[in-house]
Amino acid sequence: MGLPKIDLPIMELELPSTGEKVKYRPFTVKEEKILLVGQASEDATQEMIAAKQVVNNCLLDKDVSEIAMFDLEYILLILRARSVNNMIEFKIKDPDTGEQVDLTVDIDKVSLKRFDGHTNDIAINENYRLFLKYPTIDEFVKLASLDEDDPLADYLMLCTCIDYVASEDEVYYFKDYSREEIDTFMDDLSGETVKEIQKFFETMPRLRHEMVYTNSEGKEKTFVIEGLRSFFT
């Protein structure tokens, strides 16, 4: 007689980017192993691939390749809280004293930080507007494979995240055009438009949490954890 099949509970969460409700199951020993192998590699690309695989396994009605990177980070944090526990313990070094400080973060108190003035709708001129989309984990994996000093890295991310350009009468989806056509279009953008595109990236929602502690000199310090790697290191 074979071993019994273990049924896992099905839960629901809300995607921060859209408010869409998606169903998920907790991760199992199988997914925990995937995360541990990714973390042990100490390689950002491998860690992201592991995170994608785990979230893809646990999401029941949503393709992980379609969601924003910060959505994936949020989902993985929720999975960690519901599958293991909601407390993460880690150690930091105080910048003033050099001492080791033990901290504990409650995942249930972590939220996405949102910024005023954030928009994906950018005016090019009086006739055309440009609309951006949030980068997915696939875009971040591609960027991670580039040389850190590659001057085109930011440009490639920028181009990847332009969804379409629209006028009152027509819509031009970037996915329908060649790399050369996109480069020509980008070369004609004004510096002000590029600044607005950069602002979109700078003000994107992000996983961020501040922790206050007192060091051995009695000084109150604030330690900031931001992004997925900070929470799982």
Image (cartoon, rainbow, N blue to C red):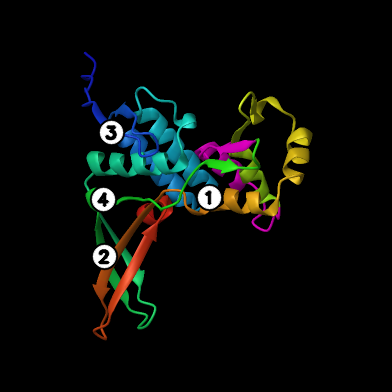
Precedes in sequence: disc 4 or disc 1: 4
Give the quarter of the figure containing the C terminus.
bottom left
Mark 3 touching mark 1, by CB under 8 A?
Answer: no
Circle 2 crowding by C-alpha within 10 Å: few under 14, some 14–19, many from 20: some
In this picture, which residue range is highlighted in magenta?
128-151
Label annotation for residue 13: 3
Q: Mark 3 vs mark 1: give the one in front.
A: 1
Does the residue at mark 3 contact the one at mark 4 (Cβ under 8 Å)? no
Above or below for 111 versus 176: below
Mark 2–mark 1 Cα distance, whole angstroms, equals: 30 Å
How many angstroms separate mark 2 from mark 3 (CA)? 27 Å
Res. 43 visible in picture:
no
> From mark 3 to mark 4, how far is it between C-alphas?
15 Å
The x and y percentages for residue 29 are 30, 36
The disc placed on residue 107 is 4
| Badge 3 or badge 1: first in the primary sequence | 3
Residue drawn where x is 30% and y is 75% of the image: 221
How crowded pointer 4 is (Cα within 10 Å; few <14, some 14-19, many 20+) is rated as: some
Query: On the image, numbered disc 1 is attached to which residue?
Result: 201
